[in-house]
Amino acid sequence: MSTTQSQRDLQKARTRRALLDAGLALLEEQSLSSIGLREITRAVGISPAAFYRHFRDVADLGVALVEESLGSLHEVIREGLTERSEDGERIDHLVEAIAAYVRRHPEHIRFVARERHGGVAAVRTAIGAQLDRFAEEVARLLARDEVSRGWSAEDLRMLGETYVDHMVMTAFAFLAAAQGEGPPEDAVAHTARRQLRLISLGRRHWTSQQAPPAP
Amino acid sequence: MSTTQSQRDLQKARTRRALLDAGLALLEEQSLSSIGLREITRAVGISPAAFYRHFRDVADLGVALVEESLGSLHEVIREGLTERSEDGERIDHLVEAIAAYVRRHPEHIRFVARERHGGVAAVRTAIGAQLDRFAEEVARLLARDEVSRGWSAEDLRMLGETYVDHMVMTAFAFLAAAQGEGPPEDAVAHTARRQLRLISLGRRHWTSQQAPPAP
DNA sequence: GGGCTCAGTAAACAGTTGTGTGCCGAGCCC
DNA sequence: GGGCTCGGCACACAACTGTTTACTGAGCCC
């Protein structure tokens, strides 16, 4: 369905890609709201006016980058969580999957980290919507575990959000480690694993009622 | 010790404050790296050159804003966690404390959210360092609970980080709610409370050994 | 193969930016 | 009360910004 047709469409798609890549690259050392349109076109090697053939705005390009950056994460999550081994291994596997993803696509993670609460509202909400979908998806995956017997949809949703929050934080920490800003990668992984174990423990002893469990 | 002395120093401090406030206000709809020096001075009503009497850079002003924004949080955390009532109430109290803080100082939270992973490295690391201190402090507070008997310093530290991560995420969610971007405030509070209960449960059943608990 | 589509161009527009210089003049200190 | 300190000013600088206009020319379709 999405097969590019004519040779001209193909060329257009090519410069579009170049624009997206250039934008992503420029985000390495600034935020989206401070990137200039001319700066991007200069990096690509086209005239400023040509930019408008592809995007209305820099913000518009940003929104396109969201799908780009978070789309490929779905499979990673699914693969990282569907692993059918025992709990300990599953945690190790998930954390390693996140680390590997950050290693392979640091610019994507950087973009999401930078613009999740950044200065461009449209991008912010686009990222928020994607993370929402992730939470839903994770909830659905976790619902299949036997530990989830008797959990309400609302509780499962809450659990999914907790997992996603943790994955996001961990990914950001891995990124910081990669650029030498926070603790090193193995320390991040070590902490992330233990935090997942903590959550997993809470999950195992969860009861839906309002009252706190007996001391 | 920090009492301002001469009338001239006082006036200088006053415009410095005005610059900080203007910067904070401008961050409402853009990121630090896109704020212009002239934009700030224009908002304050002084000439561009006067800016250099107070800060070397806009980035420099950003670093100053970090202490400004996160300094007052220490007491909130302490007060929110030291509460000596039973577990359920303690959680309610903490979440409400966060909500109240965001309601009172939304610009501070917005600044931290926007620049935690923003385009200015110096500000990023300054915020990171502050959050580190928070994690340490929370760990120290939680160590005093009886539930923490036998916990290693490393495990306590991990727990503190988990709490801080959660508080930060919650604060950001409250902020989003306040500007109508995410779920409404009461939904955020509801989720946050249950997530805290989850963590609290995991904490109660935590064992330090590597092997996973028996099924 | 002739006409049309349309990605990309060059040039000009009016604003804006950060930084440097020299100079006030109110307030401090002795 | 006289000299110095120093926050703030006006002005100038070259460089840059987003957007519009009229255009070219390679590739598509019939």
Image (cartoon, coloured by chain):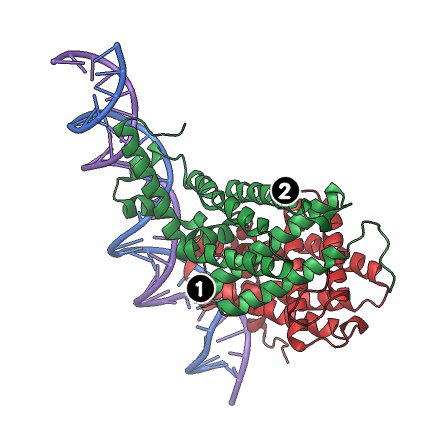
Chain colours: A red, B green, C blue, D purple
Q: Is residue B144 above or below residue B92?
A: above
Per the image, the residue denoted by label 1 is B178
Q: Position of residue B35 (x, y in %)?
A: 39, 49
Q: Are marks 1 and 2 on the same chain?
A: yes
Pick the front one: B194 or C27 = B194
Q: Quadrant of residue A184?
A: top right
Q: Position of residue B118 (x, y in %)?
A: 52, 50
User: Measured from the top left, where is residue A2 in percent x and y?
Assistant: 62, 77
Q: CA distance from mark 1 to mark 2?
A: 29 Å
Q: Give the amino acid type for the residue marked by disc 2 in the picture.
A: Glu
> Secondary structure beneath disc 1?
helix
Could you tell me which quadrant the N terminus of chain B lies in? top left
Closer-to-camera residue (A15/B111): B111
Q: Which residue is labeled 2 in the image?
A: B136
Can the viewer see residue A143 in this picture? yes
Front in this rendered view, residue D27 or A191: A191
Q: Amino acid at mark 1?
A: Ala
Give the residue displayed 26% in from the left and 29% down from the top. B8
Q: Nearer the viewer, residue B185 or B59?
A: B185
- Residue for point 48% across, 65% down: B177
User: Tag 2 or tag 1, which sits nearer the N-term?
Assistant: 2
Q: Chain of mark 1?
A: B
| Left or right of B60 on screen, residue A213 | right
Say the numbered circle drawn on residue B105.
none
Compared across the picture, whether A30 is left or right of B209 comes to left
